[in-house]
Image: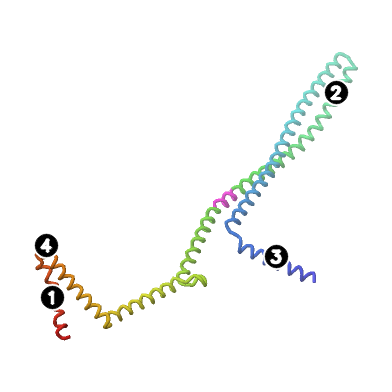
Amino acid sequence: MIKLFKRMWRYMTARGNAAFNDAADPKIQLEQAIQEAQEQHRRLKEQAANVIANQKQTEIRLNRTMEEYEKVGKNARQAILMADDASKRGDQAKLTEYTSAAEAFANRMVALETEVEDLKALHLQASQAADQAKSAVNQNSNALQKKLAERQKLLSQLDQAKMQEQLNKAMTSLSETVGDEVPSFDEVRAKVELRYAKAKGASELNEASVEGRMLEVEQASMNVEAQSRLNELRAQLGIESSASTAPAQVATETAEPTTAEG
C-alpha cells in the first residue's frame, strides 16, 4: 500500500510539473534561470573571497613570524656577545644571565623556525586554493556572460515564435471557423457572393419583363415632353433650338409607328 501511495505521489507530482511547464511563460522561466545563475555566481565569489582572505591572512602571519624570527636571532647574537664580554671581564653572574638569555632566544628561534616552515606550507596551500578560486570565478563569469548573451537570443526567438503563432492563428481564422459566434472568412465571402448573385439575377429578370419595357416607354415619353418644354422655353427666350430638337424629333418619329399600330 505504501508503495502504491508513493507511486501515485510521484505520478501526481510529475503530472503537476508537466502541467506547470506547459502553462508557464518561457520568458519568466528564462529570467528565473538567469537570476539563479547570477545568484550562484555571487555565492561563488563570496566563497572565493573567503579563500583569498585566508591566503592573505596566512601570508600576514608568515611575514610577522619571519620578522619575529629575525628579531629573536639578533637578540640571541647580542646575548652571546654580552656573555662573551662578561666572561672576558670575569663577571660570572652576568655570564650566567646572558648565557641563559641566549639559550632562551635560541629555543625561541627553534620554535619560530618550525612555525615558519608550517606557515610556508600552509601559505602554499592557501595560494593554490586562492588561484583555483580565482580561476573558478573567471570561468563561471565567462559562462554567465554567455548565458546573458544567449538570453537575448532566446528572447528574440521567443518574440519571433509568438509573432509566428499569431500569424498562423490569423491565417487559420481566414479559412476555419473560430467559434460558434464568429464565422470564417470563407463563410462570409460565400454569403456575400450568394446575395450578389441573387440581386443580379433579380435585376436581369426585371429587365426582361413586360413591366420593365413599359417603364422604358414611360421614361421615353417623359423625355419627349421634357425636350418639348425646353424648346418652348428657348423659343420664349429667343434662343435657337435646332440642335436640341433633333433628339426630340427622333424620339417622336420612333414613337409614332408604335402609336399607329396601337
- The percent position of residue 86, horizontal first and vertical second, equals 85, 16
Q: Is residue 77 left or right of residue 206?
A: right
Residues at marks 2 and 1, CA–CA distance in whole angstroms: 155 Å
Give yes or no for residue 84 being in the magenta stretch.
Answer: no
Camera-side residue of 60 and 199: 199
Amino acid at circle 3: Thr
Residues at marks 3 and 1, CA–CA distance in whole angstroms: 96 Å
Camera-side residue of 197 and 55: 197
Q: Which residue is mark 3?
A: 13
Outermost residue, front side = 236
Residues at marks 1 and 4, CA–CA distance in whole angstroms: 24 Å
Q: Which residues are magenta?
A: 142-149
Asked if the residue under mark 2 is in contact with the one under mark 4, i.e. CB atoms within 8 Å, the reply is: no
- The percent position of residue 190, horizontal first and vertical second, equals 41, 75
Mark carried by residue 250 = 1
Q: Which residue is mark 4?
A: 237
Mark carried by residue 23 = none
Camera-side residue of 148 and 31: 31
Q: Is residue 211 left or right of residue 47?
A: left
